[in-house]
Image (cartoon, coloured by chain):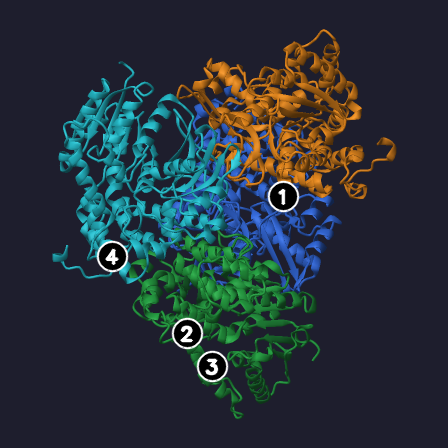
Chain colours: A orange, B cyan, C blue, D green
């Protein structure tokens, strides 16, 4: 099959992979895949092997002749690839668990794409993501990189700014909003339109239309009435401020609860050092169970249990994106891409998450109407947090990392912040190639070696 | 047929109308029209009647049960309309002929959408266009206004800024670029993509892709080699500066020859007072012949001769737009609509001409990558010329009109300009309700009453 | 004395007034004042009378022939005034005490120019300030209004945007920075230059030069070493983050500790409901003692004790400003005035606090070099907080007030915020003419009438 | 005299130098100059020697002990300099004469700071100016470079963008406006204020105040009545459009006649190839006569005849600037410096000509109120012309040079422009180190070697 595509999955040991495989197998007619390469590192080999075997069983059952190859050698896999899905986790789940624990110790937000945990994650991940992107420049210069690796907004921006590799970032938040609104409206997709805009994990629906009628108010009322179909399953239910959301007239994504109901959310969800029940621990638990299921030699399909993991539509988005590019469909998807004027008040060369039409040549964002002043300032502030964090991650700048956190409205400032930053940087130091110990030591706080 | 649409054509006595009728009759399945109202004023009745009879013959021949009604009472026609096509000419062709003659007398650019002719045209037309838009606000608040009336960019902006009527401006320049590029590439439309951006009569193709390959350089080379399929038939062939266009790497629309080859174009095309062969005279001649043909009681279709008129695809665009809105197709068209951030460096609330997807709820522009500095400055300057002209037209401000012309790089400045402006305003005075004689008299120049 | 000036003090019962009087008496040669009008309201008559008598004794002792008049009739006082100093407190100190108590009850920032206390203060004060400005438009259209009334940045912006009265806002924070830096440098004023820029209570020194050498780093090091001469006496000592301030390379004003050391400052200074030791209570205590001193019929000069009040240089700034305007000196002062491009990234028509040269015709800001991204985002965010608060105050918009507070990084979000806002608006309701009870009731929270 | 200053004049053979010397001798008390170095190249030695001898006679007569040294070795002169006045002309007057002749041949604007003559001048001059600035970085890193070398706006921007040498550009246009307005008002300088803003040779007075009254309208009326005291003597009288200037309400500098009365000015002043009476020829004639006068061994002062040369106040500005910097006076002067936000709508890092206070540490521009849209567009367009021209000059980019000229509203476009550009670049080729012959050959036009 001469025109068959080569797809590479980096971080293939992820529990999400079976969903991706299922999506690919469902599209074999429009998206003819010849080879599926599963790449992961030594530390994750046991998981990658379980996934590899399950994938082979799924392919066989489907009757497809897609070849499945597992390797730890990334460069072999990337050679002549057509699509590369990046879903690795730098430092594995263990790092996330440790980082969330540090945040908890200081009573701070423990969320893997924001605050000190997000910053540490970015500092670990961005150098690896840039290595992959630079390898692709020579090994498969025509390939598309679809990035899911978190913190997705920052990783995608880092690649878009620093590599010529064609890159699109994807997230399941917008697609959950789209699906949720359609469900509430019982909408036929062809008469439905939603425009989403903002940053990764910081988007609003700017317009919701059904049969040419504005349904924004209806959806807002439903959500305020507790009927929040937009919320991904990994986010607990919570109550919006009715006065606030009605006055804005735009539907915020679930992650905006951190900004619009900060005291409530942090009070309820903030883990304490003693019980240690962070999101990362919950995820680890789910994962352990999932791999038990995946191991079953009789399983040859995506198991029901995967839905609990919370990332629904992640893989669906990846498959849909590959299909849209391959077939130049022009359909509208919600993607992370360079701003280039889509959102006013942000630089051209930063990453934004916006509705765009997808052609073979890439994503063409729909122009976004000016945001109200309060939303714009939040977007600008968080984008600056992200851009400074990327700069800190690439250059190992401790001062810039501190300034990035000081900007972030979800992170307090003062001595505790310096201690927390010093603590988390020191504990991650072996995975932060660009940072220097002596720079970190300038931060306040006295950490004896033994505590590290 | 209960859901049948009511379409109104204002300025129906135009020689273009048969093309529009033909387009509607070709789409009866997807675009079910119950009533087609042909509106024109007393002065154009003889033309409107010829059109009316030809239209009836065309409808009858097609077997459609569309009703055709002719009226001079605009308000009756607009009541409960679904689509209103505005293609009137304020002051009729006679005004255009006279204005172009005045421009010629002063050795100035004689072009109906630019310079002093465009300004006089805007001052005559915008008040009428606003009347129509305001009538629609109450008579048919859900209807779409499709504007072709020249100067189309300024008329559309005036309405978008001053009326709640849903309005889209259309022009045949972008569609000629699209068709021309496809012809040169022998392209299958489904694999072809062109993004167009700028202002009305001042657009560039920003991207031309075929089968996922960048074809900009190829198309530019063809055009420089004289193979300019993008040029509308009413624009004479001319030679671009190869050094300039290659360095820009964007394909300019044909009207940009006024800015990029100004001396050559003005030298060749500038009419002189003696021979008086203005474009308006040429058009008048074509029109006279066309109406001769239309009168033929055996004619029941759009005649071949119409193609010479120069506005190919005008009506095609109107029909395609009505269809896209009615059926929520999401297809890409090139339209005049509010900027709202599509082109950076221009205000949100000005009209731009950009590629957009068309939904039932309107046009959603694709975001436009930053223009190179020279193109941006030209766009900004001409947009300011337009916005000042609109302001002058609405408020009758002579000083603003002068300042608008002084900005325009195609119009010289100095005494001659003041004389020309005074001359053209005085000669149009009976059609300029907002202008005061005493304000005009402050301009340099001594025009005796007799000369007016 | 025919060219003698008429100076009006609104809120003359303030304990600061003697400093102002002293400043005026020291400048009689260059600033010839014929009449000094002391205006206050009925509720403050006892204080105004003490001030009036003390002022008369001071004038007499100085040998000046300045007339001193006390009145409650503002319009008589404003007639033909040359300079109007506005230093009133809407709702008197009692309102500030109550508001700070409400903030304390919810564990929130209790600061009269920020957070819910600042918002309530703005909502009470802005309508009164606008009344004064509008009266001046007719009673003394050539007069200058020098505003000290807090929240000074917002009050000044409200007037500048909504009145033609010539207005400059003054604050003692920049002048304390200037004096402090000069003291640390033991500088001769003529060789010293400091440029200050930002918003009221949110400024940085952008440049500190002495004898043509950059002294920024020296001053920063002194401040970090605990030698903070820039700090006004009413602000407690605290510790900056050395890593942060050194990396920024700009000296922040003392109020920036709220943003750069938020956890530390709030932890230490946050008053609790039980002990109730708010700043307002402290101030009340100082005032009581001051008026005891002022009452002494033997006192005929500004007493030493006034220095404890914390507002040093307030009145000094007012006198210096009147002198600079009257004599067209062109000296540099730090003022609140319309931005008009001085600080990039903010609208032209908002108020900023910047270094400016003072001419008879007003303040001409020095252009400000672009702020680093983190400082800019903070400035933009807090300016939007201010502008939304002003809008809420003028129009009585509860939703806008809530959105303003949600933007403010020093105010949490969620249920507690809605309760606090509802509480403080209800308790101020009799002084909020533009707000409607039913709008406030839409906020979360159940306050029985009795508690109000 | 140990603190005596070292001043260097580059291009000392200029006929202006005696004015500079006179200015320095008048300020010996406040500006103590120990050494005055006169630098020029071999080709200008005969003029430099005349100047040198005259200077020595002037110094002797004044009784000053300033040393005067003449050299062709720039590096010796620059070593440890305090102030460097750059007033050289790359290619000498002969190049200007030849370039203006080429422009005349094509019927184009022949003006040494604009159009093709200005572009050729920039391409010759900027590389030399950058050499000087780079030499200063090491030979006298603390010195100030005062640039008068034309095209002054472009040369100054090129240095400011590409060198760390402290640089201020000066021009006599703003100072002529200031003096002219004061003369019309019979104003005492201490009560007079004028704010000037724009680009070099493209400025407006934004405010004219005398004794705290707005005098803009008065001055405009005087100028329109023919009483134009603002016009430098080297610019012929001409008539503004009264309607235009009154509507703008800002006083334009004389060079704006090229933009606001283009047809009139070009018609009257455009030199023709046959008579060849260009400005350059006029200047040459004046110069020849001046040097005759300078030669007179009895002359020991600036002769009257110099006033005819047209550059009054050039040297006065230089002396005043050196004095203001040396003595940290804080006075307001009108200078070319980095924008950094002074004029909105232009990049931070371009050169603008604005009113600024002068301190030892440099120029601090007064913030400039937003320009009206038409003036802003002109400023932006001409700044882009300048910035592209600088880019072309530094990198030898022919395409960029063409695009710069196409943008310029005073230069037509089309074949004639390409011919003219090719002609002038070829004739200057030996002085354009960065340009390649083969790039120039790509322009239209067939120039045989003989014609060069």
User: On screen, C248 above or below A263?
Assistant: below
- Quarter where residue D433 is shown: bottom right
- The residue beneath circle 3 is D287
**Which chain letter goes with mark 3?**
D
Q: Position of residue D268 (x, y in %)?
A: 32, 70
**2 or 3: tag closer to the N-terminus:** 2
Label ID, residue A174: none
The CA distance from mark 2 to mark 3 is 12 Å
Crowding at mark 1 (Cα within 10 Å: few <14, some 14-19, many 20+): some
Instruction: Provide the secondary structure element on which disc 2 rests.
Output: helix
Judge if badges 4 and 2 mark residues of a common chain: no
**Which chain letter goes with mark 4?**
B
Q: Residue furthest bottom?
A: D298
Nearest to viewer (mark 1 / mark 4): 4
Label ID, residue D279: 2
- The residue beneath circle 4 is B420
Crowding at mark 2 (Cα within 10 Å: few <14, some 14-19, many 20+): many
């Amino acid at each position: 099959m001469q025109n068959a595509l080569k797809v590479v999955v980096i971080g293939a040991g992820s529990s999400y992979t079976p969903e991706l495989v299922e999506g690919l197998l469902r599209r074999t007619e429009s998206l003819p895949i010849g080879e599926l390469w599963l790449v992961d590192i030594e530390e994750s080999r046991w998981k990658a092997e379980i996934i590899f075997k399950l994938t082979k069983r799924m392919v066989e059952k489907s009757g497809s002749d897609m070849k499945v190859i597992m390797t730890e050698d990334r460069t072999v896999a990337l050679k002549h690839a057509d699509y590369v899905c990046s879903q690795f986790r730098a430092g594995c789940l263990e790092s996330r668990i440790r980082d969330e624990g540090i945040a908890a110790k200081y009573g701070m937000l423990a969320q893997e794409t924001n605050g000190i945990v997000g910053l540490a994650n970015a500092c670990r991940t961005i150098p690896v993501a840039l290595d992959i992107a630079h390898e692709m420049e020579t090994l498969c210069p025509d390939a598309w990189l679809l990035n899911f690796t978190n913190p997705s907004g920052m990783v995608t921006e880092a690649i878009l700014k620093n590599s010529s590799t064609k890159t699109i970032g994807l997230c399941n938040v917008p697609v959950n909003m789209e699906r949720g609104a359609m469900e509430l409206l019982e909408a036929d997709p062809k008469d439905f339109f939603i425009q989403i805009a903002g940053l990764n994990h910081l988007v609003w629906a700017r317009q919701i239309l059904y049969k040419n009628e504005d349904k924004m108010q209806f959806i807002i009322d439903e959500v305020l009435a507790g009927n929040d179909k937009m919320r991904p399953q990994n986010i607990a239910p919570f109550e919006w401020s009715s006065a606030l959301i009605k006055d804005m007239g735009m539907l915020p994504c679930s992650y905006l609860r951190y900004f619009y109901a900060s005291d409530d959310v942090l009070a309820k969800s903030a883990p304490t050092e003693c019980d240690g029940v962070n999101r990362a621990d919950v995820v680890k638990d789910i994962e352990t169970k999932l791999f038990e299921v995946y191991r079953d030699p009789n399983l040859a399909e995506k198991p029901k249990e995967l839905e609990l993991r919370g990332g629904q539509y992640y893989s669906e988005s990846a498959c849909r994106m590959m299909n849209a590019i391959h077939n130049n469909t022009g359909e509208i998807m919600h993607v992370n891409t360079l701003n280039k004027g889509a959102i006013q008040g942000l630089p051209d060369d930063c990453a934004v998450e916006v509705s765009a039409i997808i052609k073979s040549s890439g994503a063409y964002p729909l122009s976004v109407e000016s945001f109200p002043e309060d939303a714009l300032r939040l977007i600008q502030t968080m984008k600056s947090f992200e851009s400074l964090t990327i700069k800190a991650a690439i250059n190992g700048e401790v001062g810039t990392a501190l300034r990035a956190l000081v900007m972030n409205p979800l992170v307090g400032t003062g001595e505790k912040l310096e201690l927390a930053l010093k603590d988390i940087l020191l504990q991650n130091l072996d995975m932060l190639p660009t940072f220097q110990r002596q720079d970190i030591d300038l931060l306040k706080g006295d950490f004896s070696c033994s505590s590290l």
